[in-house]
Image (spheres, helix red, strand yellow):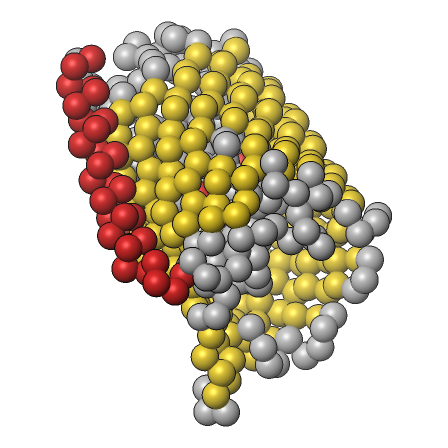
Amino acid sequence: MVVLKDLAAHHSDHSVLCSLHKGVAKAFSFVALASIASYSHAWDLPTYGDTSIAMGDTLDFGGQRNRINTDLIGDWQFNAALTGLGAIQSNAPPGDPRNYGDISNAQVVIAKPTGMLQLFAIAGYYSIPDLSTNYLRAATQTKTTWGALPVAYASIVPNDSWSLYVGKLFALGGAEGTFTYENTNIQRGLLWGQTNSITQGVQLNYQDDAWSTSFAWTDGADSGKYNWLGISTGYKLSPQTTITAIWNGALSGNPADSAKTPLLQNNSQITNLLFSYKGDNWGLTPYLQYSVIPSNPTVGIYGTSNTQGAGLLATYRITPLIDGKPGRKNVTLPFRLEYLNTRGDSGTNPNNLLYGPNSAAWSATLTPTLQNGAFFCRLEGSYVKALNYAQGSAFGSMGAAPGQARLMIEAGLLY
């Protein structure tokens, strides 16, 4: 994904605390008003259901009765994500405030999930907090990346096994989703930063009781040039365990370089191997990731570089699943561990795979989460340690601090 920089200034310790209070209060006043307005009926609904979004182990939409089904327009489902966040961090780099509050999602999810022709769209504002990168506010994030309609596609579904997606899609690859509510952690991880998030193109899917396979032809990191091929194959080892292999990569060079289409990542080829276990008390997803960016001087890449990473996404359910589903009140303790290493030098300026050529990093993130009906609240503590970083490329005002800690809170409605 993209490393984006906010333009906020640094503050003194006293103003840090005051502005944190004001920022968090502003973000959560929006959430509180939405909660009060929806309280009379949202809280009676279950927390688990089908929204056509690949959700993590800790959160789910509560508004499963938000459906319209008529002979004239067919079966439609509507959901909303209204969430806010606040954060404070150590060793803030230039252009990134030590603390901030913001709306993290103000989105509507619309789906026509039945029939041969199905539709899916997400509309609204979003921010994408990402480990070790500067925070970009929702209004700017939305404007500079995928706009107010980030996902919108039609599906041709002739039977239960086959489907064809056409439009703005979630990209294949990686173990984390794009928006905060899709994931067990508020912030996206180090490995996610090397993958695509939103792409445009077509995707053919097949699934049966044991196998699932997808083939995609897309424009990579929403570049407008259709030169990416993606292949994903999963096999269900048991009702609780699945193994998945994914390859997604550029077949030719592309000189595009922007906030949503970073030069190196958009010319990469990415391989993932994932194992997933989902039990009543534990959810575990260990995975490996490898990417390579071939040398291509015609697009401004003057050397070959690659990344090797390993991650673990884990969730302990304090309130266990009942018949495979969480209850109305769901308390979970998810955590993430990661290591990412880079090799080679692309000769670009900046070399933004991580913290300069041949750099590495590890991260640890813990996110205790409570969901009660449509309302949720979660706290998060994270730490990133940069290794072998280029001078001026790490954390702090001079880019010389090797580590960064963050405390975050996110709350709101998934209705």
Q: Nearer the viewer, residue 250 or 399?
A: 399
Identify whether 27 is placed above or below 239: above
- Dividing the picture into quadrants, the one containing residue 295 is top right
Q: Is residue 402 left or right of residue 29?
A: right
Identify whether 342 is placed above or below 49: above
Return the x and y of residue 229 as percentages of the image width and height.
Answer: 63, 52
Q: Which quarter of the rendering shows the C terminus?
A: bottom left
How many numbered dots are placed on residues in this image? 0
Q: Residue at x 30, y 10 (%)?
A: 398
Can see residue 161?
A: yes
Q: Is residue 365 left or right of residue 126?
A: right
Return the x and y of residue 387 as percentages of the image width and height.
Answer: 52, 11
Identify whether 175 is placed above or below 70: above
Can see residue 106?
A: no
Q: Residue at x 28, y 12 (%)?
A: 397
Return the x and y of residue 127 as percentages of the image width and height.
Answer: 35, 43
Q: Is residue 124 left or right of residue 59?
A: left
Q: Nearer the viewer, residue 92 or 215?
A: 92
Q: Nearer the viewer, residue 351 or 240?
A: 240
